[in-house]
Image (cartoon, rainbow, N blue to C red):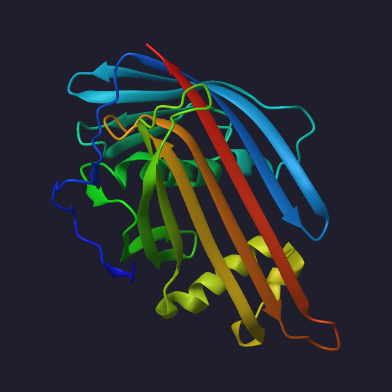
Amino acid sequence: APLESMPAAVGKEPGNVTLRFAWPAPVEGRCATVARRIDASGTQVIRTTSRVTAERDGDQLRVDTLDVSVPSGVPADLLPLAEPWAAERLVDAQGRLLRVQVLDSKVSEAERTAITMRIGQRWQSMVSAWAGRSLPLDATYSATAPEQTVEGPVRLQIAIRADGRVPCDVRTTATDCVRLRILSQPTAGDAAKVARLVARELLSADAFMVYEPSRVRGFASQTTVVLITDPATLLPRRLTERRTLQLRIDPLLGDDGLDLNRQDEMTIACRWSR
């Protein structure tokens, strides 16, 4: 379907999938994460496990990530890809994230800010972006939305889609869950700011010090999120995020210039019990 202006909600017509935030509580999830980075140096993979609990806190919900298990020897710059953070989230009855508390007292203030931002983005893609919507299957809607970054806020062009009904996990054939998809990329107006963000990620510290926007000849930043969730509760079963970065920079003072490509992918799957 052609992209259309995404409404706040679509009417509950026959054939639509209605998405409601109604996590059962208390509930506990055993989660496994596989994170993969592909770049010029090859492929690196991280596997972690964690426990997620949800309990009522008055009329709100407290969601904790606990008992995170991370293998030894993982390079520090790869760890954030697996999001291995023990944290507490406070969520309102509509699924909106009210507060994040990082439970590791050893992280720096800068790290705490970055982790809090990332946890907020993950909750949005997993729950709050969908809560309260009723979407027709196989229709794609577009919108623009702000995202906070270390360079300040940028606006993203977003395409959102409900692909269809699917089994919640491999142990069942009943199609009680739904597959949802978000594709995001920067708007043209924020191209220079996003190119600088991509350069900050892909370049070494020394190379970034002499970064000049006028030397950028091409860049791309695109993120795809695929979520399998229970539409009656938005209790997530599986989420995969794939992020592709590309950056081409003209030569400076006789060097060869740069042509950098990187793909990051993270999948988290959870099995829930009351």
Q: Quadrant of the N terminus?
A: bottom left
* Residue 171 as seen in the image, left or right of residue 160: right
**In the image, residue 261 lies at what x, y percent?**
71, 66
Q: Is residue 188 above or below residue 178?
A: below
Extreme residue in the top direction: 274
Q: Quick check: can you spot residue 86? A: no
Q: Nearer the viewer, residue 101 or 72?
A: 72
The residue at the point 25 percent across, 28 percent down is 22
The residue at the point 45 percent across, 27 percent down is 173
Residue 183 lies in quadrant: bottom left
* Residue 222 as seen in the image, left or right of residue 168: right
Report the number of discs: 0
Residue 157 lies in quadrant: bottom left
**In the image, residue 91 lies at what x, y percent?**
28, 32
Q: Is residue 142 above or below residue 232?
A: below
Q: Nearer the viewer, residue 261 or 6?
A: 6
Q: Is residue 247 above or below residue 115?
A: below
Q: Nearer the viewer, residue 129 or 194?
A: 129
**In the image, residue 229 lies at what x, y percent?**
39, 35
Q: Quadrant of the C terminus?
A: top left
Residue 81 lies in quadrant: top right
**In the image, residue 11 lies at what x, y percent?**
13, 51
The residue at the point 51 percent across, 58 percent down is 223
* Residue 146 as seen in the image, left or right of residue 102: left
Q: Quick check: can you spot residue 202? A: yes
The residue at the point 69 percent across, 70 percent down is 208
Q: Is residue 33 above or below residue 223?
A: above
